[in-house]
């Protein structure tokens, strides 16, 4: 590697290093993306809540579910009493998952769901309806519980809330456990904004078990758990009986890591994944060692081209453009006579009968043809000016003689 290449590599390395250091020391912006996963420490993750589950449910074995509801419940024994907690911005169960979770609750288990929506199949089965009130700007919402033992304690939501609430419930099987109070702005006329209170926390009986549903999942996030609303979470979880097992759903999450790569099938199979990784490492090692053993490419140096023909053509074109036929004919005569002297060793200082006979003999041409050419040459040499036709005629005669 020459000195110039080393300087370029050094400058490039310093630039890359500077970018890396800048990215490391630069303060990262707050990620307000809703996640609700057990490992996310962002404002709308559930790391704090998941860490406190063992304190709130001390007698329950906590199991984190990393697969679909259907797969999780098919593997488990319903005879073991358990609770199942779902928290996400929106929970949408397909038909199989809905049927499986309905069977799970009907056998005497409890499902706790906190989301702004629960999918039409589940809501239709439970005979409930949900709406959200979207405002132009984020406002404050207040949560309250109906339990008289809690009293008039209120819990404020200032960010990330959609004011979701229940608009209808099955009154024969449902108990309202809490409300949300928020402000509706009036943009049609000059009337002041209106405060409304709607149910957001219910308990619905299904078979021998219960669905406990809450429409404000943000209240269970890290942001509100660390902002003084942790009591609201503990109060709402107090409606869950202390059972042997507690399932925490970590699959139906907005922040769940999903492999979108075309290689997702390979990466999801342990054996294929290791084969893929070993192949990539092997190829990398092969490239590194092969690059070191390869000889540097030897540049191809092309030989110099004989450009005499091109030069002659260029000079001829120049004479032709200037119409200097006299000079052109003189040069043609000089070159042709030099050709005769070099090839046939004939003296051309005097073009007489002796010269004609000697040239005809050595060149293998007829006396008449040779004599006509020599007489034409003498004729041109004696003239002071020449024409284009004479130049063409001379060229024809010389080419015929050389053949």
Image (cartoon, rainbow, N blue to C red):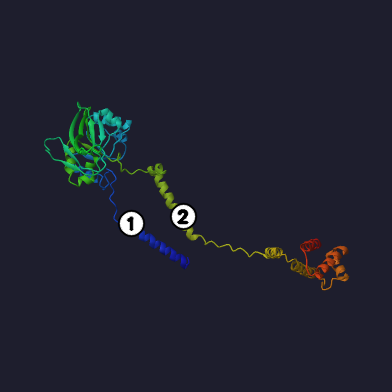
Residue 255's place in the image compared with 326, above or below, is above
Please identify the quadrant where the C terminus is shown: bottom right
Residue at 29 percent of width and 52 percent of height:
29
Question: Which residue is most to the top?
Answer: 172
Name the one closer to the observer, 285 or 127. Answer: 127
The x and y percentages for residue 170 are 22, 27
Q: Is residue 370 left or right of residue 80?
A: right
Q: Is residue 105 left or right of residue 260?
A: left
On residue 62, the disc is none
Residue at 32 percent of width and 30 percent of height:
95
Residue at 32 percent of width and 35 percent of height:
71
Q: Which residue is mark 1?
A: 23
Name the one closer to the observer, 290 or 323. Answer: 323
Residue 240 seen in render = no
The CA distance from mark 2 to mark 1 is 32 Å
Name the one closer to the observer, 93 or 201. Answer: 201
The x and y percentages for residue 310 are 68, 63
**Tag 2 secondary structure:** helix
Q: Which residue is mark 2?
A: 286
Residue at 51 percent of width and 60 percent of height:
294
The x and y percentages for residue 181 are 19, 38
Specify few, some or many for label 2: CA neighbours under 10 Å numbering under 14, 14-19, or 20 or more.
few
Q: How many numbered badges does the structure rendering display?
A: 2
The x and y percentages for residue 44 are 26, 45
């Amino acid at each position: 590697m020459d000195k110039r290449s080393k300087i370029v590599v050094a400058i490039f390395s310093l630039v890359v290093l500077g970018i890396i250091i800048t990215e490391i020391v630069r303060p990262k912006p707050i990620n307000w993306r809703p996640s609700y996963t057990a490992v996310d420490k962002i404002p709308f993750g559930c790391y704090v809540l998941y860490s406190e589950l063992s304190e709130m449910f001390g007698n329950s074995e906590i199991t984190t579910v990393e697969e679909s509801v259907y797969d999780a419940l098919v593997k488990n024994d319903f005879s073991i009493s358990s609770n199942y907690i779902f928290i996400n911005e929106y929970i949408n169960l397909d038909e199989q998952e809905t049927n499986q979770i309905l069977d799970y609750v009907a056998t005497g288990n409890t499902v706790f769901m906190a989301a702004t929506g629960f999918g039409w199949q589940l809501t239709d089965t439970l005979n409930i309806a949900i709406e959200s009130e979207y405002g132009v700007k984020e406002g404050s919402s207040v949560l309250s519980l109906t339990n008289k033992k809690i009293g008039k304690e209120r819990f404020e939501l200032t960010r990330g809330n959609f004011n979701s609430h229940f608009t209808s419930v099955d009154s024969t099987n449902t108990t309202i456990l809490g409300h949300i109070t928020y402000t509706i702005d009036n943009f049609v006329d000059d009337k002041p904004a209106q405060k409304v209170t709607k149910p957001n926390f219910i308990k619905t009986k299904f078979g021998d078990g219960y669905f406990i549903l809450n429409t404000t999942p943000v209240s269970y996030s890290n942001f509100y758990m660390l902002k003084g609303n942790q009591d609201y979470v503990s109060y709402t979880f107090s409606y869950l009986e202390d059972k042997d097992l507690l399932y925490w759903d970590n699959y139906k999450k907005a922040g769940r890591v999903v492999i979108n790569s075309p290689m997702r099938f390979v990466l999801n199979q342990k054996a294929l994944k290791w084969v893929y990784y070993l192949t990539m490492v092997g190829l990398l090692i092969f490239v590194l060692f092969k690059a070191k053993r390869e000889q540097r490419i030897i540049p191809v140096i092309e030989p110099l081209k004989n450009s005499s023909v091109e030069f002659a053509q260029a000079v001829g074109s120049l004479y032709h453009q200037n119409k200097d036929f006299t000079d052109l004919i003189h040069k043609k005569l000089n070159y042709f006579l030099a050709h005769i002297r070099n090839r046939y060793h004939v003296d051309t200082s005097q073009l007489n009968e002796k010269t004609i006979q000697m040239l005809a003999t050595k060149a293998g041409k007829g006396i008449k043809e040779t004599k006509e050419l020599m007489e034409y040459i003498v004729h041109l040499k004696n003239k002071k000016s020449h024409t284009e036709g004479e130049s063409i005629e001379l060229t024809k005669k010389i080419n015929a003689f050389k053949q």
